[in-house]
Image (cartoon, rainbow, N blue to C red):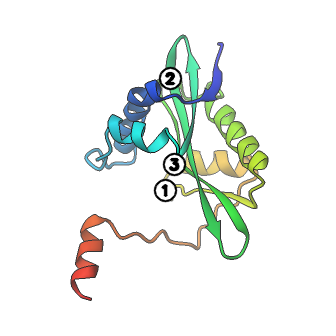
Amino acid sequence: MNISIRKAIKEDMTAVLILIKELAIFEKEPDAVEITVKDLEQDGFGNNSKFHCFVAETKNRIEGIALVYMRYSTWKGSVLHLEDLIVSKSMRGNNIGTMLLDEVVKYGHQLGVKRISWEVLDWNESAIEFYEKKGANVMRDWDVVQLDEKGIKAYLSKL
């Protein structure tokens, strides 16, 4: 199978959103995706892009993505954050995840980052095994903390 990994272009964002929605269903959050194709196009392209995206393409179809953006660690300095690594359900097992992760690691190295970080759900054992086989440190003693839009508003209303 001929699979190519390339930098995403604006015209790919419809396919990217389809994969994001597929991931939300897999992660048992089917109604959580609020972002639109227009949001992705505006946020990912232009002078102040908020993210960088790689796509895996085969037979003129996008079957996987890796979406990353820069962060800063007070301990280490520049960090590349992998927001999502997604391979379509029908194409899993074809080395696409490895190819995308390879591209992310090469990109992070080119940027000179001190770390590449991401989260994985604690019940997603196949992903955890995949990342550990690649040499990643899955830090099971850390919890993800978030304030969603509603939480932000509630927080601010108490100030």
Q: Which residue is mark 3?
A: 48
Circle 3 — which element? Answer: loop
Q: CA distance from mark 2 to mark 1?
A: 24 Å
Q: Residues within 10 Å of mark 2 (few under 14, many from 20)?
A: many
For the residue labelled by badge 1, is the local secondary structure a helix, a strand or a loop? Answer: loop
Earlier sequence position, callout 3 versus callout 1:
3
* Image location (x, y in percent) of residue 66: 57, 39
Camera-nearest label, 3 or 1: 3
Q: Is residue 8 above or below residue 40?
A: above
Residue for point 74% across, 46% down: 134
Residue 44 % position (x, y): 48, 41
Residue at image x 68%, y 35%? 98
Relative height, residue 59 to residue 149 (above, below): above
Amino acid identity at mark 3? Asn
91 vs 137, left or right, is left
Residue 121's tag is 1
Residue at x-position 70% and y-position 60%: 137
Neighbours of disc 3 within 10 Å: few (<14), some (14-19), many (20+):
few
Task: Identify the residue shown where x is 73% and y is 47%.
Answer: 133
User: Which secondary structure lies at badge 2?
Assistant: strand
Q: Amino acid at mark 1?
A: Leu
The quadrant of the rendering that contains the N terminus is: top right
The residues tagged by marks 3 and 2 sit, at their Cα atoms, a distance apart of: 25 Å
Q: Which is nearer the N-term, disc 2 or disc 1?
A: 2
On the image, numbered disc 2 is attached to which residue? 62
Tag of residue 9: none
Return the x and y of residue 32 as percentages of the image width and height: 29, 50
Cβ atoms under marks 2 and 1 closer than 8 Å:
no
The mark lying in front, picked from 2 and 1, is 2
Q: CA distance from mark 3 to mark 1?
A: 30 Å
